[in-house]
Image (cartoon, helix red, strand yellow):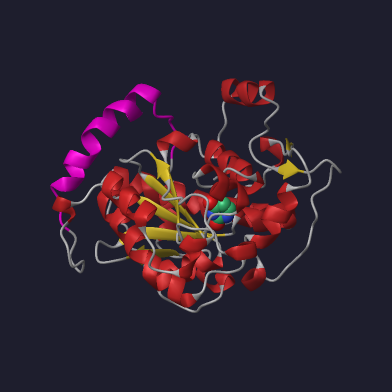
Amino acid sequence: MPLSLDSRKRDILATMGVEVWGLRGDGGVDAGVAGEDVAGDSVATEVNAAADGEAAAVVAAAEMPAPATVKGTVESAAAAADPPSTVSADTVAAAESTAETAAAESTTAGESTTVAADSLARVAAEVAACEQCELHRARNNTVPGGGNPRADWLFVGEAPGRDEDAQGEPFVGRAGKLLDMMIAALGMKRDTVFVANVLKCRPPDNRDPLPGEIEMCEAYLHRQLALIQPKVIVALGRVSAQALLKTGDALGTLRGAAHRYGPAGIPLVVTYHPAYLLRSPEQKSKAWDDLWLAKGIAEAEAGGAALDVS
Ligand code: URA
């Protein structure tokens, strides 16, 4: 089922010079490296690409291919998806004031502490003081993540890059702009979702996170997930997918199916990292399939439909 964008939304996006999602650099053409699925997701290239200058939004919604049919029983959930609705700023503000109370009422099996004693602010404060691994030595800021504490959607990237380290916010660089467009294409805004990373500090030269770093940092992400209890998690890229699913499987193997995360069994969909999509724009249609799959799941979960996923 193709995304239905009404003419009003299309007009708004056109006014902004944004035609749903797609970025290209000053040269007008993305560096299109047709990489392997397994390779297509490292942050390092994105940060280098950010130095290329301001990105421009270019790809028309009409140009986005209709998503391919998704696998298995998730198909019906995706097919049931209605056009997206946007949560207002007021709704978000109201949600923020009650979210931590709501979260405090639940507990998560498998964690050594209950969610009752936890909060997103506390996680962020502990991250800010964290010196568990060597990454704290060179950081300018920790990047705990942010967004709507009651979000239905939680996007998880790999680790902060240069811009994120400078600002203390996730996905503020060029890949972040593309992520915003992906979120907009789903009918949402950044502040209606929650965005976090597996690592909360920038690895030097944006190298891949080391297994030990992931191990030491992942409890923060687990706590955030337990507090927010999203309806769907979108793992952006190989590092995020492998860390969340505790697997060494390749990205290409993990895409296209709905997984479950953690003891609470939160549905999880794997897609390409936006930094990879900047380098390999020809893969955007596959990413769109993934987002559409996630959208069907989120809406099925919101409607209380039992979703049969792996
Ligand atoms: N890439 C990531 O994985 N996370 C960020 O926050 C920015 C770029």
Q: Nearer the viewer, residue 161 or 26?
A: 161
Q: In the rendered view, would you say 89 is above or below 220?
A: above
**299 left or right of 98 in image:** right
Which residue occupies 67% across, 31% down?
Answer: 18
Does the magenta-highlighted stretch encompass residue 90? yes
Q: Is residue 289 visible?
A: no
Residue at far front of view = 137
Q: Residue 115 in the image: state x and y as whole percent.
A: 18, 54
Q: Chief secondary structure of the magenta span? A: helix
Q: Quadrant of the C terminus?
A: bottom left
Which residue occupies 44% across, 34% down?
Answer: 191
Q: Residue 218 in the image: state x and y as whole percent.
A: 37, 65
Q: Quadrant of the N terminus?
A: top right
Q: Nearer the viewer, residue 104 or 79?
A: 104
Q: Quadrant of residue 88?
A: top left
Q: Quadrant of residue 76?
A: bottom left
Q: Residue 188 in the image: state x and y as whole percent.
A: 48, 35
Which residue occupies 24% across, 38% down?
Answer: 99
Q: Nearer the viewer, residue 207 or 258?
A: 207
Which residue occupies 51% across, 39% down?
Answer: 186
Q: Nearer the viewer, residue 19 or 119?
A: 119
Q: Residue 80 in the image: state x and y as whole percent.
A: 41, 45
Q: Which residues are magenta?
A: 82-107
Q: Quadrant of residue 253?
A: bottom right
